[in-house]
Image (cartoon, rainbow, N blue to C red):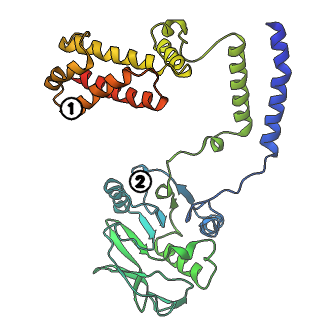
Amino acid sequence: MKLTIKRWIPLVGLLGVFIVIGVFLSPEKLKEYPAYVSESPSPTGVKALYTYLENEGGAISRWSLSPDRLSKKETGQLLIMAEPFTVPDQEEMEEYEDFMRRGNTILLLKDNPKGMFDIKTEMIDSPILPLVRDGKGNTYETETLSGVRLEEEAGDKVLLDDVDGTIAYKTDVGQGSLIVSTTPAWMTNGRILEKDHLSLILLLLKEGGAEEGTILFDEFLHGGESGAPLATLYPQWLLLLLLQSAIFTLLGLWMQGKRFGGILTPREETVRFSDERIKALSAWYLKGKQYKASLLIQSDYVRLLFQERWGIPTSKEWGDLKEPLERRLQTVSEKDIASFLMGMKGVLNKERISKQEYIMWSKRIELFRKEVEDR
């Protein structure tokens, strides 16, 4: 045993060296980010806006928990929802609404926000002019505009609109408010610096009180609380240590003679009760071209079934079985019974049988056997 362990130590050490080299020298794959995620540096992410607000000294953080975990005491918070992947269910919507009633604000930027917070929308054709007006009449130029316009109600404050309708508005919800906009593309990394997009986004943020309270980027609706991959939760040196420990454990169990899996049943306990002997005999008959002898065995077995089930003596000739078989095999026509009996009598009287005849009559005998056993 000591000699065996000594032989394995260099191999395990070499394996560990290769693992270390692979971990530290393997090229890192480019990480793919979903759109509108605050950690994404890709053109479709919103990391630029998040970093800008963070550098401005504001209280900003990411929120990846369910809405029922939102603070029930603080007020003046601004929760930014940038193009949610899914529409929250009824219970989650009630939690978001309760968050606003307590004196907080939600800024929802979604191409078509219909289905959230009872928002009503209407579809339009392609915008005529890429110009947007704010509530004071100032005009802004944009690169992109959504094909959806909002339907505000009495008491709602229109923040942005164009010749086709309302693009963003603000409505009171309890002590807080909801700001809705159909232009989430303005805040993405690839478009925030185009035209007047940054000014328009800052206008919406200012309306939501971003300069005074805490800003939260909602990542729950981007797949938050789904669990991070194991490789990102723990450092690589710890994962490597766990892998080597698992290898040493398996090798130790293997060298001690431990085996895993079901118990193997000795072959001699099953062979004696199997049909291997029958298969061997059939193979011998086929190789030796003992077709007639094989048919005689099959026919004798069927005759034995006739006697056991219906009391027809095995001494009767095949030609004398027509009448008793017709009475009992009602599912088989008289013509088929007569053909089978005459054919059996003829083929068994031959001195030699070809392989084709053997195969054909073996199938016919098998069909009759099943008919008898099913009665």
What kind of residue is marked 2? Pro
Residue 67 shows which numbered tag? 2
Q: In what element is the residue under mark 1?
A: loop
**The N terminus sits in image quarter:** top right
Q: Quadrant of residue 23?
A: top right
Q: Position of residue 272 (x, y in %)?
A: 48, 6
Q: Nearer the viewer, mark 2 or mark 1?
A: 1
Q: CA distance from mark 2 to mark 1?
A: 73 Å
Seen in the picture, residue 216 relative to 149 is either above or below; the reply is above
| Residue drawn at x 46%, y 12% as measured from the top left | 274
Q: Quadrant of residue 10?
A: top right
Residue at the left extreme, as displayed: 327
Number of residues whose C-alpha sits closer than 10 Å to that of mark 1, classed few (under 14), some (14–19) or many (20 or more): few
Residue 45 shows which numbered tag? none
**The C terminus sits in image quarter:** top left
Q: Position of residue 101 (x, y in %)?
A: 34, 62
The residue that disc 1 covers is 332
Q: Position of residue 368 (x, y in %)?
A: 29, 26
Q: Which mark sits nearer the N-terminus, 2 or 1?
A: 2
Q: Nearer the viewer, residue 25 or 338?
A: 338
| Residue drawn at x 18%, y 32% as measured from the top left | 334
Q: Position of residue 248 (x, y in %)?
A: 73, 21
Seen in the picture, residue 183 relative to 213 is either above or below; the reply is below
| Residue drawn at x 16%, y 20% as measured from the top left | 324
Q: In what element is the residue under mark 2?
A: helix
What kind of residue is marked 1? Val
Seen in the picture, residue 220 relative to 288 is either above or below; the reply is below
Locate residue 371 relative to residue 98 in the image: left or right. Answer: left
Asked whether residue 331 appears in the rendered view, the answer is yes
